Amino acid sequence: MNWTRREVLLGLGATLCTAIFSKSLTIKVFAQQRTAKKGDILVVIFLRGGCDGLNLLAPVDDKNYIEARGTYTRITDKGNNKGLPLRNALYAGEFRIHAKAAGLKELYDSKVLAVVHACGLKNGTRSHFEAQSLIERGVSEKSTSSVHSGWITRHLHGLKLDGALPAVALGASAPESLLSDVNAISISDVNGFILETYSNYGPIQQAALRKFYSEDSTLMQAGLNTLNALDYVDSKIAKAADGTPLPYKSQSNARYPINTTYDLASSLQMVAQLIKMDVGVQV
């Protein structure tokens, strides 16, 4: 095939930029022969918008809680703000969950949900962004400059990473909780996790890229690992006869309602799909 200089640079530049600028592609080792991890999988959902814990789950009969909050800003045991009771708490009084969190109460009653309350920061920072950073790095100091890794990163360092994709973040980039993790990868769309190629020259471009990234350097290794990651995930996706990715179907008929404002459902669907693909996801 006769390629123009522009076509070659387009393909090389796209992958090179991806490898340099995306947190998701700082992969140190991407061994396709590693066996998939079996066992428990940790799914972390971070409510970045903020969650008022005492308006989600509250000790409704606690005198300090009653004094600190007016009737319209707290959960009560009767009236318009009446919460749903939760039993078996260590607290001697009565905890109630917000009425709009009936789904969480159902999980709690089924004994598949536990709540750890009052475990936030003590430093009193009023910066939303600083608080997020502290939580994701797993530290309580006001400054995070001395901590160069996320809490999930440190958690993963204590595990035996058997799978090809042990840590996956759903989104354009990895969160701070995965800071400095060389195995973590970010995916915005599992079915769209492919190499963007020029026209119909995909296989030729990929062969050229692999040859280009053949040298032994950190940058070249990142580029090669990127191509390996793309190929490996693509090989695990169920496809139709023409190569088109098939829609994910839940074995338990779970529904994932799409919400254009809050896209949590589609993220959870991708989590389920990645786990079912058996690529070794642990977090």
Image: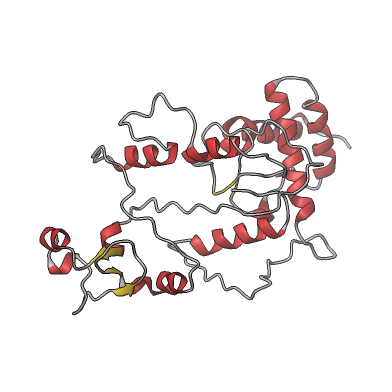
State which quadrant residue 94 falls in.
Answer: bottom left
Q: Position of residue 186 (x, y in %)?
A: 59, 44
Residue drawn at point x = 34 percent, y = 55 percent: 117
Residue drawn at point x = 37 percent, y = 70 percent: 101
In which quadrant will I find the N terminus?
top right
Q: Position of residue 155 (x, y in %)?
A: 54, 39
**Is residue 120 rendered to the left or right of residue 26?**
left
Which residue is outermost to the bottom? Answer: 79
**Is 248 rendered above or below residue 164?**
below
Q: Is residue 183 visible?
A: yes
Q: Position of residue 220 (x, y in %)?
A: 72, 25
**Is 85 rendered above or below residue 214?**
below
Q: Is residue 201 visible?
A: no
Looking at this view, is 62 or 249 the one in front?
A: 62
**Is residue 183 rendered to the left or right of residue 72?**
right
Residue drawn at point x = 23 percent, y = 40 percent: 124
Q: Position of residue 127 (x, y in %)?
A: 27, 40
Looking at this view, is 176 or 240 the one in front?
A: 176
State which quadrant residue 97 falls in.
Answer: bottom left
State which quadrant residue 156 falls in.
Answer: top right
Which residue is outermost to the right? Answer: 1
